[in-house]
Amino acid sequence: MPENPFRSLPSVDALVALIADDADGPGLATEAARTVLERARAGIRNGDSSPTLEHLATETRVALAIAAQQPLRRVINATGVILQTNLGRAPLSERALRAIAQEASGYSNLEFDLQVGERGSRHNLLRDLLRRATGAEDGIVLNNNAAALFMVLHVFAKDREVIVSRGQAVEIGGGFRIPDVLRQSGARLVEVGTTNRTYARDYESALTSETAAVLRVHSSNFRIVGFTADPSLKELADVAHRQGILALDDLGSGCLIDTQPLGIAHEPTVQESLAAGMDLAMFSGDKLLGGPQSGIVVGKADLIATLRSHPLARALRVDKLTIAALAATLQSYVEGRAATEIPVWSMLSTPLPAIKRRAQRWARVAGERGAVVPSQSMVGGGSLPGEGVPTWCVAIGGPGLHRISGRLREARPGIVARIERDHLLLDPRTVDPRDDVTVKRLLATVLQTDERA
């Protein structure tokens, strides 16, 4: 009678003992051993032979290494998309990183008033910086811009109407749509105008005693061109204020500086929104602002005070590390140093010759498979749709591009590039120059390994 192949499998404890030198503790090692043994049993049931102890130990070490990995891994963004949403959007400035490290290393005055020695509010910590950076009367920070829009609508327009141009009832990413946000907030959406043309009179015609606000939603992730029309922000604010209702502006990208000197289209700024008379402006902290994920509401002091005292302010509040990073980011704007200190702006303003020199150095390690080609770096992240700046990329040609791209992603750190027109493109503009040595080393290693395969 043939021997039962299951009997040759070791116990969990025996397998853990085999890899004891590689395990920091019994917990993960036990979990890894159970996973490997269950996989072996499934293989035997499907007709495979019983694996050797050496093979099981190797598999367990691999499973242990995978289990011990941090779920978030650092990657190098060589895609050419500066605000790459899938890769975490805006990289933080050195100033913001130092602020996070300092805040994380001990205690702070997060909710403690040092002057009076009593409980304070985290919502007060950023108000002065927000005032100076945007010119607003006051401001509050929540955990993202969708939360900011939701809270503003819930607090000021619940069970009432909010008028939005039909061309601005957009999807803001991840399947979330402006009409859905309004519905969940309790506000009732009233669409006016057409997809491509909406006038101030369309808003005026839709006003009723049930109207709480008019809302402008900046089309930050798409663009309609040609036969189009929209009222100016001042016209929209005037319509609202004649009726005694709120003028709200969902700016999305959170731009605080003029983008035109960089050779890209003008992006509406927070300062322009407030100067035009909008009562509240909402925007993201991790897009063109260049800070951590957050949703910022600035505007009239009495409205911000209402938001600050609402129960949702606690549910949607940010943590101490976000406050530290955002404070450092805003300070760069207040001091006029954003162009050099905020990575988003330094990437956009890096001169083409400097980009080309880096691309040439990268291309050399690729040998005959590498070339330097002109391309476009895109802003991305739902900001400045279709806008980009000229760049130079390394183009890797030849067979196996998807395989090479996959191996670059799996490296430590992973390198994320893009395939375009039968070439794998790596754009230096979105890569920190301090990572150039790593990019060249990993690119050379992956290409050499692929050639030998």
Image: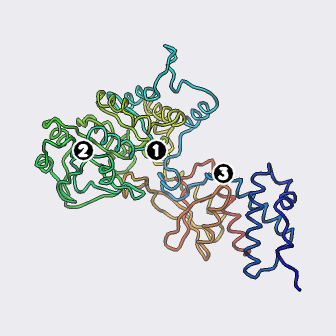
Quarter of the image containing the C terminus? Answer: bottom right
The amino acid type found where label 3 is placed reads: Gln
Measured from the top left, where is residue 442 in percent x and y?
Answer: 68, 60
Q: Quadrant of the N terminus?
A: bottom right
List the single residue furthest toward the front: 1
Q: Residue at x 57, y 60 (%)?
A: 416
Q: CA distance from mark 2 to mark 3?
A: 44 Å
Q: Position of residue 318 (x, y in %)?
A: 48, 37
Q: Which is more toward the observer, 17 or 417?
A: 17
Say which residue label 3 marks.
70
What residue appears at the point 60 percent right and 54 percent down from the top-left corner?
Answer: 75
Between marks 1 and 2 in the image, the one whose residue lies nearer the viewer: 2
Residue to which mark 1 is pinned: 286
Q: Earlier in the sequence, mark 1 or mark 2?
A: 2
- Residue 348 is situated, as x and y percent measured from the top left of the image, at 46, 48
Is residue 185 found left or right of 345 in the rendered image?
left
Q: Which residue is mark 2?
A: 159
Q: Nearer the viewer, residue 310 or 388?
A: 310
Q: Earlier in the sequence, mark 1 or mark 3?
A: 3
The label nearer to you, 1 versus 3, is 3
